[in-house]
Structures are given as C-alpha cells and as structure tokens.
Amino acid sequence: MIEIVGAKGEIENIDQFLKDVDNFGKSHKIVISVLNADMIYGKNHLISAVNHAVRSIDQKTNTTNTLGMEILLYASGERQLKNAIPKMGVKKGKTNVAFVFTKGKMSDRIIDELLSQLNFIRKDAVLKGNIDTLKKFGIRKKEIDTISKDKLGNLILEKVAKVDIIK
C-alpha cells in the first residue's frame, strides 16, 4: 500500500526532522520517505518511484540500504545519492514536502498525527508540479515543447524509469 501526502511547514533542523519522521515510522511499523515537494510532478511520479524501488529491492539490484533511500533515488531520476539528495531532499526553512508512506497499515489518523507532531499542514496541491518543476528537474525546454500538456508528467516518469538503465 502506498499513501502520498503533500504538506507545508517549516524545518529548523533537517537532521532532527528526519530523525523524528524515522522514529514515528518505526513506532507505527511503516516506512516514511520525505521528499522536496517542489521537485515532484504529481502523485504518479512518486508511485512510479516507489514501484521501481520496491522492485529493485525484491530483485536485489538496489543501490541503497533502505527502501526510503531507494525511493528518493528513483524519484530524483539520478543514479547516485550524492546527486539525488540535494535534488530531492527536504530543505531547511519554510518548505513544501511530500510524505510517502509504504510498507505498513496506514490511516488518516496516523497521517494527521505525524503532521501534527511535525507542525505541518496537509496541502496535497504542493505535489501538482508545473513546467518550472520540469525545468528544475533538468528537462530541457525543447523536450517540454514536443509533448502535449496532458502528457508532460511522462517526461518525469521517463527519468524515473531511466534510473534502472543507468544504475
């Protein structure tokens, strides 16, 4: 089961924030990945990243040691964590984040509890993405111009799938 939630809030200390998320996940027996929502182009982007990450772990072709980091790697469209983390990792200050919940039993109560604990407000609209998101992701204007608006998300999905090839 995959649950994806967009949220707005403020991160004062990235290490502590990630530790709090990890501890919350462990206490509820779920895996929670947290990503920079400003680099997300819709929920399909993250669903694809999760599916690729799970498959790579199942087939023992994973690059990282955890499902959460493997999701981040695929979501970034990058082969190496040293490039993926600056691109998709959460940022200090007022920020938009994507929470990806996997490997466990989820409920709205658990999501609300996490958001409350972190002082974040649910705002799924931060996951929508736009042409600026595509450009920040490294997709050139020439590529964007060759596709109809309703298919722009496919450009990101190609980057996610390409990680398997460049691994």
Image (cartoon, helix red, strand yellow):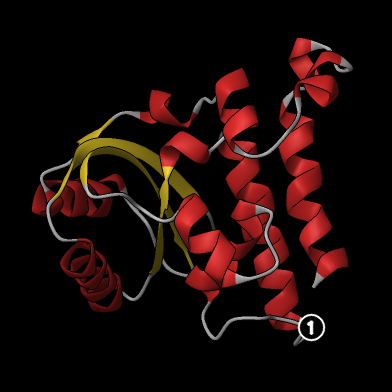
Q: Quadrant of residue 18?
A: bottom left
- From the viewer's side, name the closer residue of 111 and 13: 13
Residue 73 position (above or below residue 159):
below
Residue 83 position (above or below residue 29):
above
Which percent across, then down, holds residue 156? Answer: 72, 39
Q: Quadrant of residue 136?
A: top right
Using the rendered image of the protein, determine whether residue 75 is visible from the camera's viewpoint. yes
For the N terminus, give its image quadrant: bottom right
- From the viewer's side, name the closer residue of 4 and 85: 85
Q: Is residue 113 left or right of residue 97?
A: left
Residue 148 position (above or below residue 109):
above
Q: Which residue is mark 1?
A: 59
Using the rendered image of the protein, determine whether residue 130 is visible from the camera's viewpoint. no
Residue in the picture at 23% in, 61% down = 14
Residue in the picture at 75% in, 12% down = 149
Residue in the picture at 76% in, 47% down = 159
- From the viewer's side, name the closer residue of 124 and 138: 138
Residue 125 position (above or below residue 49):
above
Kindly identify the amino acid type of the residue bearing the numbered disc 1: Gln
Q: Is residue 24 left or right of residue 161?
A: left
Residue in the picture at 22% in, 69% down = 15
Q: Is residue 143 left or right of residue 80?
A: right
Q: Is residue 40 left or right of residue 100?
A: right
Which percent across, then down, holds residue 164? Answer: 82, 66
